[in-house]
Amino acid sequence: MVFHLAQGTVFMFLAGLGIVGNIFVLVKYICILRSTMKSIHLILIHLAFTNMMALLTKGIMRTISRLVLINLLGDVGCKIVIYLNRVARGLSICTTSLLTVVQAITISPRASRWRRLQPRSAWHVLPLLLFCWILNSFIGMSLPFYIKNISSMNTSKISKNNDYCYFESENRIIRWIFIVLMVLRDAGFQGVMGWASGYMVFLLHKHHQHVLHLQTSKLLHRTPPEVKAAKSVLLLMLCFLFFYWADCVASLYITFSLGKDSIALSLHEFLSVGYEILSPLVLIHRDRQFL
């Protein structure tokens, strides 16, 4: 009991810290967007909103499961909360991928063909964000049909990954179709993210070589803000990939483990929201790079 109380306290503190950080980022870039209207600012606003959405839904599930308020949400509540959480997790990878691509295009040489794809204003990325919402809403639309509240079923069938909501798959074909779509979405956006990140690393390496040449020539040189922003985006991308794959490994371990490892479950809960908690702290720390 003491362990669960301490565990819940730590989780709620970290989630609260992440929510406050994302609110700060959201408000700050909304104010900046009114004056500068940069596309990257709109993407960062969307990322902060997505992070808040994921933290709030995960926090609701976590609080109810620990307080054993199994009748608070019911079937409809379980469907809505878990569906929104799944959509938010999908939006996180889409937004991070879009952020990486836009930043890679921004630091491209002016003569490069990729520079022609640079959004001319913040509103030009709105169709891409809308596409992300439609895509993730469609992929997650199968979840409400398989989610039930614990109070409506025999406890012997409850999944060990959910304390008060469980998944009951009646049609395995439909279930696997949406699983494949989810895997393809993650693989596709991570592939795009990897390409854009590799391209940025290449450009940053060329810039570093140019800086060394200027230093040997005893010329003054100031690092462009786009280059600093690119380094910040790369740091965000690395954070996302770390928590994404660590979460996948923890999920596989919990799924195939014979016993209920409380430490593994606690670690998995943190990893599932680690990026949403850490990303606003990274943005706040490197805030000037995006101005």
Image (cartoon, rainbow, N blue to C red):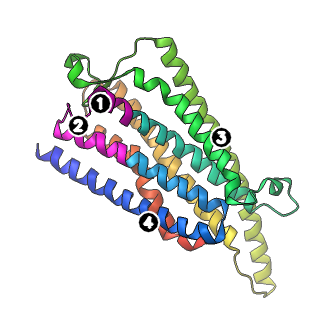
Q: Please report contact status of discs 4 and 3: CB closer than 8 Å, yes or no.
A: no
Residue 162's disc is: 1
Q: Amino acid at mark 4?
A: Phe
Residue type, numbered disc 1: Asn
Q: Residue furthest right?
A: 111
Residues tagged 1 and 2 counted as in contact (Cβ below 8 A): yes
Report how far apart the C-alphas of labels 4 and 1 lie in the structure. Answer: 31 Å
Decide which of tag 4 and tag 1 comes sooner along the chain: 4
Of mark 1 and mark 2, the one earlier in the sequence is 2
Quadrant where the N terminus is found in the figure: top left
- At mark 2, the secondary structure is helix
Q: Residue under circle 3?
A: 191
Q: Give me the C-alpha separation between circle 4 and circle 3.
A: 30 Å
Q: Is residue 290 visible?
A: no
Q: Which residue is mark 4?
A: 24
Which is in the foreground here, disc 3 or disc 2? Answer: 2
**Secondary structure under badge 1?**
loop
Tell which tag, 1 or 3, sits nearer the viewer.
1
Spatial CA span between label 2 and label 4: 29 Å
